[in-house]
Amino acid sequence: MRLLNLFKIAFNAIILNKARTLLTMLGIIIGVAAVIAMLAIGEGSKESIRSTISSMGSNMITISPGADMRGGVRQERSVMESLTLDDYKAIEQQADLLTYITPVVNGNGQVINGSNNWPSSIYGVNPDYLNIKVIELQSGSMFTDAEVQTASKVVLIGQTVVDNIFPDGGDPVGKMIRFNSIPFKVIGVLEEKGENTFGQDQDDVVIAPYTTVQKRILAIDHLNQVIASAVSEEDAPDAVTQVTEILRSQHKLTDNEDDDFHVRSMEELISTFSATSEMLTILLVAVAGISLLIGGIGIMNIMYVSVKERTKEIGLRMAVGGKGSDILMQFLIEAILISITGGLLGVILGLGSTVFIEKFLHWPTEVALYSIIISFAVCAVTGIFFGWYPARKAAALDPITALRYE
Amino acid sequence: MSKEIIKIEDLKREFTMGNETVHALKGISLSIKEGEFVTIMGSSGSGKSTLLNILGCLDQPTSGTYDIDGLAVRNLSKNELATIRNEKIGFIFQSYNLLARTSALENVELPLLYNSKVSTEERKDRAIKALKMVGLGDRMDHTPSQLSGGQQQRVAIARSLVNKPVMILADEATGNLDTRTSYEIMSLFQELNEKGITIVFVTHEPDIATFSSRTIVLKDGNIIKDYLNKEIQSAATELALLPVEDH
Ligand SMILES: Nc1ncnc2c1ncn2[C@@H]1O[C@H](COP(=O)(O)OP(=O)(O)OP(=O)(O)O)[C@@H](O)[C@H]1O
Ligand SMILES: [Mg+2]
């Protein structure tokens, strides 16, 4: 009965002070919504980078030549010849933390089908490549180890290549095409992967046995890269160490000589890029924090001023028999009603603008539950505290002092 | 003989403003018995409102004692004082003190909202009745800004009646009313007084004082006169004698 009366009083007061109620709520709504939306953008981009990288094979290990100091001249990486087929074989035989491994040689050239041609890159690999890179086949099949042995003139092509040299549609599998001037038989089409986070078209590729590419296209003996996949993501760092040791002994490096190669796990790449997106998130959190702070100060101001203004009202309520606790309860209920309603509207606006950003600006977003909880809590607590605290001071006065307050 | 409902002794009230001290009440002693109708008179600034605020438990004296119905106010807690104000006292402020943007009816209901013994329906009934008693039955939905000064004063009077107090403390409750309306209000107070309600009425007008049973005159914070009225006028009779308004 008593509480019901207080609810009634509080509700009437809220209706009476429409402008104040609206302003307070606005502060809360914007504070909460800004935090939710900004953190959703931050989390979204982080998540998108993470998923791109893991779609490239999260336990992948890349071995590239490096620091090949022939005649004291530091060479461009592509012309370094310090990585050889023997290195690959040594790693394949000795490393037990790797499941798949393939040599990689690559070059650029023109893919030609009749009158259609298209500049693309060719990757010479072995059948493990698809497993390492997590690539599925759309049609056809991968070449075999036997075809690698015999340096067969077979290729698999990505969707972008298909679109450009087979513009009339139809299954390219079984067709003959040329890469530069050498004829190849298409034996498979790769499943589409789209662009990665770095804007590379992952479908603009031609895949062939590395032996074929080495002998018939590039005429080289060395390898451009060796890529492998570790048994698991957790084993990747150990696998890196293992490969490094194998290569150092293979290259007969003494203890005071630097590595003449680089071994990198995808893990490192992930951490590099998540560091970047971490920065972005921190920046957004800072901006969100500032808007929350400003929102909080706004709430504080309006609540504080309005309660001060209502000191006379508090005096009157006490004069007609309201107890200090009744007055406090009334202001508390008011503050809670305003803060909670504002907070809920803020959450709705925040989620709504997140959906808007995702749909119309095409930014990846991911709403973080913690952002909802924190922003809501901060605004609600500020609103409630500054609605309650000045009321408590006013309610401690003698009724006549409060009534006289100007 | 009926008991003393108000008993004050050597009551002082000082206001300090910076290094200046205003002695509003300089040691007043008096007692008022249940059922008395007392008017307090005195020039402006003589301490009438200050005294009434203390009697209404709205303010605390600087020194001296105040016993209300045998209880020492000094020993009562804030909550006990609130309950006394809520259930025993009807207070009419010199400056009305109505809630702005709130209807007359809701203003009158206010004291009952803080009394959990009164149900919603009863609260409304009693507020309507009180408003009708002061002649505002047709202005219940008006907010203070939509009422004249005299009407606002009557809303304040209705609010003091609604909790069926045992004691009404009125600070110039007829200050803004024309003779006819103020006589109507005085006859209402006389009726309530006949039912046993104690009334302390601050006024400037000597003719209002003739409706009371006792008059106390203050000057500069001291009582200079305190006398019983030998001939108490009936406000109802005086009202009937007033010339009929010609409009
Ligand atoms: N809160 C206050 N602070 C300082 N001085 C005060 C305060 N209240 C009253 N006074 C002083 O106390 C004295 C008595 O004031 P009070 O209001 O009791 O007079 P009053 O008899 O009611 O006058 P009026 O007939 O004009 O209403 C005045 O001199 C006034 O200035
Ligand atoms: Mg006065």
Image (cartoon, helix red, strand yellow):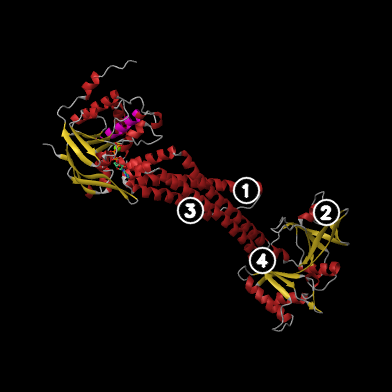
Q: In the figure, residue B42 lies in which quadrant?
A: top left
CA gap, disc 2 and disc 3: 59 Å
The answer to whether residue A133 is left or right of residue A406 is right
The part of the chain drawn in magenta is: B150-165
Q: Are marks 4 and 2 on the same chain?
A: yes
Of circles 4 and 2, which is in front?
Answer: 4
Sequence-first disc among 3 and 1: 1
Residue annotated with mark 4: A269
Q: Earlier in the sequence, mark 1 or mark 2?
A: 2
Q: Type of residue at label 2?
A: Ile
The residue where tag 3 is placed is A378
Figure check: A4 above or below B241: below
Label 1 vs 4, first from the N-terminus = 4
Query: Alpha carbon of mark 3 to alpha carbon of mark 1: how far?
Result: 24 Å
Q: Closer to the camera: disc 1 or disc 4?
A: 1
Which mark identifies residue A63?
none
Q: Disc 2 designates what residue?
A: A165
Magenta span includes B152? yes
Q: Residues within 10 Å of mark 2 (few under 14, many from 20)?
A: some
Marks 1,4: beta carbons within 8 A: no
- Which x, y percent locates residue A354? 59, 49
Identify the subunit bearing mark 2: A
Numbered disc in front, either 2 or 3? 3
